[in-house]
Image (cartoon, rainbow, N blue to C red):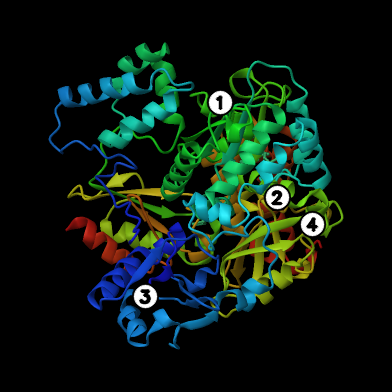
Amino acid sequence: MYIIVALYNCNNSRFGDISLPDSNTPQDINTVINRLVAEHQHRPGALLPLLHAIQDNIGYVPETAYPQISKALALSVAEVHGVVTFYHHFRTHKPGRNVMHICRAESCQAMGSEALEAHAKKCMNIDYHQTTEDNAITLEAVYCLGNCALSPSVMMNDEIYGRVSPSDLDALIAEAKA
Amino acid sequence: MTTKIYIPRDSSALSVGAEKVAVAIATEAKNRGLDVEIIRNGSRGLYWLETMVEVLTANGRVAYGPVKVKDVPSLFDADFINAKPHALCLGLTEEIDWLKKQQRLTFARVGVTDPVSLDDYLAHDGYNGLKNALKLSGAEIVKTVTDSGLRGRGGAAFPTGIKWNTVLGCESDQKYIVCNADEGDSGTYSDRMIMEGDPFVLIEGMTIAGVAVGATHGYIYLRSEYPHALVTLNEAIEAANKAGYLGENVLGSGKAFHLEVRRAAGAYVCGEETSLLESLEGKRGLVRFKPPLPAIEGLFGKPTVVNNVISLASVPIILDKGAQFYADYGMGRSRGTLPIQLAGNLKYNGLVELAFGATLRELLYDFGGGSATGKPIRAVQVGGPLGAFLPESQFDTPLDYEEFTKIWAVLGHGGIVAFDDTVDMSKMARYAFEFCAVESCGKCTPCRIGSTRGVEVIDKIRSGKDHAKNIQLVRDLSDTMLNGSLCALGGMTPYPVLSALNHFPQDFGLPAETQAG
Ligand SMILES: Cc1cc2nc3c(=O)[nH]c(=O)nc-3n(C[C@H](O)[C@H](O)[C@H](O)COP(=O)(O)O)c2cc1C
Ligand code: SF4
Ligand code: FES
């Protein structure tokens, strides 16, 4: 019996298994959010698990969902907004088809992450928090992926890559754009 | 006969291709009609050898590494499944010097067992600690943990037994055990290795904590950057529930313990225990004023034990082998072992579990093998992004909480990041301020504003503008942050900043001779 761990990316939806097609309508999104709200609203400290579930399923937390969320959890819209924006993980806009995180923390710096960063920005012609013109890749910074024994590290969607050279990065970019 | 082959599912091993290697080995074995069973273990922690593949033989496990997909056909040609020689053969795993020199207590099973197999866990002394604990009163369990000398491995090094005792002493209809698995410190990965490589030991440790203090619900607050750990933890929790090691009636004791993983959302400050509790309650991760202590008014206002992964994962062996067994390791008031994580610019990076007392130099050279680039090691940062930078003159400091305090440094979570002589320490100081600015929760001014000001002042120093005045400004600013911050994010950012300035003044345009020891 072979036990192979497979956690490969599913449309940026970290851990999610029900991603919507690219052409989802506001009604689709609304239906999904209603379902997720019903699923999570009664858990203690429900807001974070709910936000995760939403982002897993549709790739971001649409601001249009704030009223639904706030009503279900008896919070103000401002409170929901405050939580979403406090955490680096949550985003309120649809990202590119892939999300690349480059580790900026010390161990990776010691192994050349700055050059890698510069290379990535130049090749993709974008800065952090931006998306390539063809919508293939959104670039984000991350501060340690726990992969410091094999620095420098990059995460593409849910997969972590260690000892990443500029040419490895080129290959990752090419794959994401294909 | 089926041959057992071990290929790690640890995310660092996966980061250099372990999944592809596993697929290639499975495919090749099938094509050749060979009968093999592939077990996805944790990592042994010899990361420069990942992907390390092990084959079980009559004499023990034989290791090969680092294996790449392209090596797979030649491994089969050499008949590696019968442990035959190959250029990548490392011999018996247990005989590898790097591993043999360690004292693996908390990490005894990591890399050895199948992380999600309860049977494998039980076959390797798993749950002996809980079984002993269930025969003791809460106070006796707490006393055992106190007597072991275990101190929190999350950074603050507070005695674990004393914290538990406070929670035990609280009357409440509900208490909680919260595991801090936010592991935000750069240069650290031991929590991840436990959760991916031996999740049951953490589950057992939390269950013992619950039984000890009378808590029936536990949460693991897991950083969102660890998707693989989430999968292993959930698989293990499910298995423990099914077999009665978790749930309403733990091992028929009549005691309940329920466990749930909650995902963090990428805020470093949420590793601070009160910010973490706010986050678990579904709020912004603003640091709380103390008192009240979380032990008295913690999650949802109830008495709560908050402990780091390694603290909790060290409890089972203490309850299994006794307080004295654990306390016999270590030096001074630092008892037991510390899982040290070697990172950055070293030749042999990985997990080294040793009794407290080894020197930095032993770790950097005997284990680490010197720098990966072959240049001299110029600086090391110990204890994460809020830890001090140490110059070569301090490499003989033993790893011990008090010895580190004496040189104005911290051990923290046990991460050691090495830099070679190309490092620019003024840049590292700038980064420390920048990190603080990115991650500040915003509750107090010295941290929120001071960090951004710090970046600007370092930039001025680097460009030589009003040099003497700005050096003084960095010192004043650091002083304000040290004394005026609510938590250690603002309060300890001056450690990397001032240690860089004091030990490496030449990088700030100052004469080298002003160096302060
Ligand atoms: C900014 C900041 C970040 C922290 N991050 C972590 C962390 O990621 N993991 C952790 O266990 N402790 C972290 N701590 C320490 C916790 O506040 C707390 O001391 C610890 O969880 C207690 O567990 P222990 O006694 O087992 O170490 C952090 C503290 C601060 C101030
Ligand atoms: S020191 Fe910084 S992170 Fe800590 S409470 Fe104050 S503002 Fe928040
Ligand atoms: S510092 Fe980059 S993975 Fe830890």
Indicate the secondary structure of the residue bearing disc 2: helix
Look at the image and tell me in which quarter the N terminus of chain B lies: bottom left
Q: Amino acid at mark 1?
A: Glu
Q: Given contact means CB atoms under 8 Å apart, are the residues at marks 1 and 4 in contact? A: no
Indicate the secondary structure of the residue bearing disc 3: loop
The quarter of the picture where residue B14 lies is bottom left
Chain under numbered label 2: B
- Whole-percent x, y for residue B118 in the image: 50, 49
Q: Amino acid at mark 4?
A: Asp
Q: Nearer the viewer, mark 1 or mark 3?
A: 3
Q: Which residue is mark 3?
A: B68
The quarter of the picture where residue B125 lies is bottom right
Q: Is residue B462 left or right of residue B329?
A: left
**Between marks 4 and 2, how big is the CA–CA gap?**
18 Å
**Between marks 3 and 2, how big is the CA–CA gap?**
41 Å
Rendered residue at 38%/69% (across/down): A165
Q: Amino acid at mark 3?
A: Lys
**Between marks 3 and 4, how big is the CA–CA gap?**
39 Å
Look at the image and tell me in which quarter the C terminus of chain B lies: bottom right
**Between marks 1 and 3, how big is the CA–CA gap?**
44 Å
- Whole-percent x, y for residue B291 in the image: 74, 23
Q: Is residue B139 above or below residue B397?
A: above
